[in-house]
Image (spheres, rainbow, N blue to C red):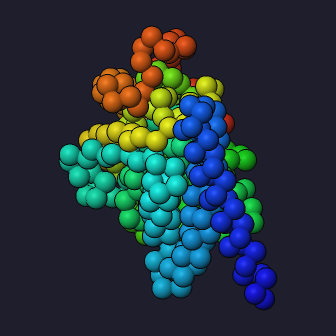
Amino acid sequence: MNLLLLTPLLLALADILTIQLLLLLAHLTSNPTLEYYGRALASFTALALSALYGTLTSAFLNIFGYGGLGQWTTARCFKWMMWFFAGVWMEVSDEGHCLGNTGPAVLVGNHQTELDVLVLGHVFPRYCSVSAKKSLMYVPVLGWFMALSKTVFIERTSREKAVAAFARAAEHMHSVKQSVFIFPEGTRSYFDHPDLLPFKKGAFHLAVQAQVPLIPVVVANYSNILNVKRKTFREGTIPITILEPIETKGKTKEDVDELVELVRSRMLVELKKLTSRAREDGVALQKHEVRSTGMMNGTAKASGVDTAYNAAA
């Protein structure tokens, strides 16, 4: 029994010592690649510890009827773990106090890299979860945590199931006052300049179906903090702005395209403004350092779930 308890402690100690050794060598040799791997390992450690905490906590909260707080408390845990292990922080500007005063709602944020998981730790209001495809529910540990913490699952295998899933998700949001966070770009952009990929429409269909506000969350380009292509990962503080909510009451599926264009255009304007400030603080790469400058045309492409919804609704 003592060996079973001692082994994970020794592994954890070895992990922490490896992180510190990599960061020390990176500092002594001015080697950004060593720093990249050191902070990447630190981030993985923070994520693993937070996931373990989240699974146990969500199970406990569920017993007392507070399972909807599972992802909020787990995200907060990860926020502090990342500050401790990797030295990365995010500074949130929410002048209208939208995160605390608006709910339930669909939060939409720009998606840059794997580090965006940290965004959830800084912006998640209480009773908020991510959305996920239903198949993830059956993945050991991850699926258990998602189910226990009230993840909004979306079925995507057919048009009928897609429409039914949106209806259930909308009902769920109202019945338990649960907000949902979605990355409408659908994938990480890895941009080293302020831009957005075309938005998929699932988040907007959900907001319209539930008749709840859309809250845009804009994270400055942080390509000088984490840049996967250049293998750089530095400590620093990344700015985030919460824009005013956009109401969907009275909107229908015919209004979705207009909502997509409105939200994306507002987010892009703020992203450029925020990144300009981030460049002054050394968070984003300077203009002369940027390799890819081609801008997207703003056209939102439909995903399979969008097509299924539109065809059946």
Residue at 61% across, 25% down: 230
Residue reaching furthest to the bottom: 1
* Residue sitting at the far front: 28
Q: Is residue 284 visible?
A: yes
The N terminus lies in which quarter of the figure? bottom right
The quadrant where residue 308 appears: top right
Q: Is residue 7 above or below residue 187?
A: below
Classify 296 as above or below 254.
above
Is residue 302 placed above or below 87 in the rendered structure? above
Q: Is residue 246 left or right of residue 114?
A: left
Q: Total of numbered circles in the picture?
A: 0
Q: Is residue 162 left or right of residue 274?
A: right
Image coords of residue 286 (percent x, y):
42, 18
Question: Which quarter of the rendering shows the C terminus?
Answer: top right
**In this orientation, which residue lies closer to the viewer: 74 or 45?**
45
Measured from the top left, where is residue 20 in percent x and y? 59, 52
Residue closest to the eye, 140 or 1: 1
* Residue for point 46% across, 41% down: 235
Which residue is more in the foreground, 81 or 160? 81
Q: Is residue 297 visible?
A: no
Q: Residue at x 42, y 27 (%)?
A: 284
Question: At which x and y percent is residue 41?
Answer: 64, 49
Name which quarter of the figure residue 177 lies in. bottom left
The quadrant in which residue 31 appears is: top right
Q: Nearer the viewer, residue 205 or 23?
A: 23
